[in-house]
Each structure stands twice: as structure tokens, then as C-alpha cells.
Image (cartoon, rainbow, N blue to C red):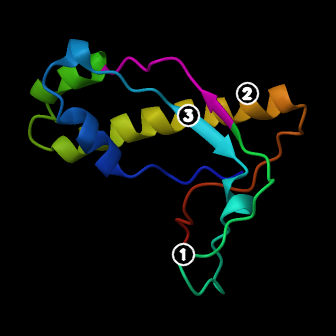
Amino acid sequence: GRVHPFRRGVGRLVAAVHDEERLTVIPFYHIGCDRVQPTTTTSTSVFSRPSFGEEIHVIFGPPVQLSHLLTLRRQPPFDRKPELLYEVIAHTLEEEVRGLRAELYRRLGREAVFPPEGGDFTR
């Protein structure tokens, strides 16, 4: 149930699109894949046998409009430090996915209790 922090590479991919009006990003969230093809610290092969018969649930959100963020590339401080824009885009998409997660749990009638998220910045 955890949504790991999106990395700035996601934002970099989006920012690489030069025709802002044609950019379409469709967010989605899924649950159940971890039971179909588990990955654990004891996994010995990436080619392990999947568990058939497990349920997978997927929810897609509406297209996320990011053109307003892409116009920031020409403005300070993003014109000098594009990685800041990449992080803003990644965070925006991460929040969309978190919203989809809550909606999927609501539709499935499951309690939306999620593990702590984000990094440990106390060290």
C-alpha cells in the first residue's frame, strides 16, 4: 500500500516534451501484483513462477495537466536549475497517484490505512 517517493527522473521525462499542448500523462495505481510475482529478500531469480489466481486491481485517473509547470522552465530558478522543476513535476504526479490509491481502496470497501511514507530525514 505504500507509494514510494517519485524520483526526479519522472519529471525529467515529462520536461523533455517540448510540445506542451500534446503532453498527456495518465496516472494509475494498482494493488495485488506483489502477490502475483512477489519480490523478497529471499528471491533467488527474477524468473520466479508467478502465482496465478490472485486478484489485481488497477485504477486510472484522468490526464494530468502539466503544461502550466512546463512553462516554468524559462523562469528563475528553474531556468538555471532544471532539476528543481523535475522534482516539482515528480511530486505533482506522486500526489495524483496517492489520490488514486485512496479512491481505489474506497471503491473496494477497504480501510485506507497506509504505512508511513517518505524518507527518514532525521539521520
In the image, residue 57 sits, relative to residue 23, either above or below, namely: below
User: For numbered disc 3, what is the local secondary structure?
Assistant: strand
Q: What is the span of residues highlighted in magenta in the rendered image?
A: 58-66
User: For numbered disc 1, what is the local secondary structure?
Assistant: loop
**Front position in the image: 37 or 71:** 37
**Front position in the image: 80 or 65:** 65
Disc marking residue 28: 3
Query: What residue is drawn where x is 45% and y is 26%?
Result: 26
Q: Tag 1 or tag 3, which sits nearer the N-term?
A: 3
**Label 3 to label 1: alpha-carbon separation:** 25 Å
Number of numbered callouts drawn:
3
Q: Is the residue marked by circle 1 packed among few (<14), some (14-19), or many (20+) residues within 10 Å?
A: few
**Label 3 to label 2: alpha-carbon separation:** 11 Å
Q: Is the residue marked by circle 3 packed among few (<14), some (14-19), or many (20+) residues within 10 Å?
A: some
Q: Tag 2 or tag 3, which sits nearer the N-term?
A: 3
**Label 2 to label 1: alpha-carbon separation:** 32 Å
Pointers 3 and 2 in contact (C-beta within 8 Å): no
| Residue corresponding to mark 2 | 103
Q: Is the residue marked by circle 2 packed among few (<14), some (14-19), or many (20+) residues within 10 Å?
A: some
**Front position in the image: 68 or 100:** 100
Disc marking residue 47: 1
Image coordinates for residue 107, horizontal then vertical, percent = 82, 26
